Image (cartoon, rainbow, N blue to C red):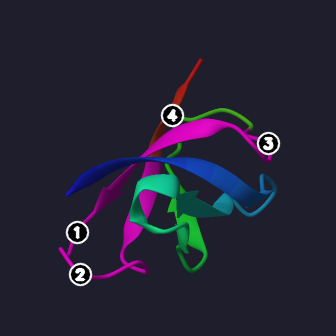
Amino acid sequence: MIRKGIVSSADNLNKTARVYFPDLDNNLTYRIKIAENVGEINTGNIVIVAFWQKDSMSDGAVIAELR
C-alpha cells in the first residue's frame, strides 16, 4: 500500500522517521526506515510511504519526498 503523509519527526542520522496521515484521522506510524535514495527530511515535509502489510503502521518505509 502506498500513502502520502506528513513527517512528524525525523532522525536523519539513523534514517528513520514518524509520519502521520491527515486523511486517516492523523494516524501516526511507528519509527519507519527512510530509503537510502531519499535525502534529508524535516518535520512538516510531505512524503510517500510504502507499507508492506495493509493494516500495519510499523512495517513500511519513506520512499520519496514531494517537493
* Residue 5, horizontal then vertical, whole percent: 50, 49
Q: Report the front residue among 48 and 32.
A: 48
Label 2, label 1: how many angstroms apart (C-alpha)?
A: 9 Å
Alpha carbons under labels 4 and 2: distance apart: 25 Å
**How many neighbours does mark 2 have within 10 angstroms: few (below 14), some (14-19), or many (20 or more)?**
few
- Sequence-wise, the earlier of marks 1 and 4 is 4
Q: Are marks 3 and 4 in contact (CB under 8 Å)?
A: no
Q: Quick check: is 38 in the magenta stretch?
A: no
Magenta-drawn stretch contains 59: yes
- Where is the C terminus found, in terms of image quarters? top right
The correct choice, above or below, for 1 with respect to 36 in the image is below
Pinpoint residue 13: horizontal percent, then vertical percent: 81, 56
Three-letter residue code for mark 3: Asn
Quadrant of the rendered image containing residue 57: bottom left
Sequence-wise, which precedes: disc 3 or disc 2? Answer: 3
Q: Nearer the viewer, mark 3 or mark 4?
A: 3
Q: Earlier in the sequence, mark 4 or mark 2?
A: 4
Helix, strand or loop at label 1? It is loop
Q: Which residue is mark 1?
A: 52
How packed mark 4 is, by other alpha carbons closer than 10 Å (few <14, some 14-19, many 20 or more), is few
Q: Which mark is drawn over residue 37?
A: 4
Identified by mark 1, the residue type is: Trp
SS at mark 2 in the image: loop
User: Distance between the Cα atoms at labels 3 and 1?
Assistant: 23 Å
Give the residue drawn at x 76%, y 57%.
10
Residues at circles 2 and 1 in contact by the CB criterion of under 8 Å: no
Say which element carries label 3.
Answer: loop
Magenta part of the chain: 41-62
Q: Which residue is mark 3?
A: 42
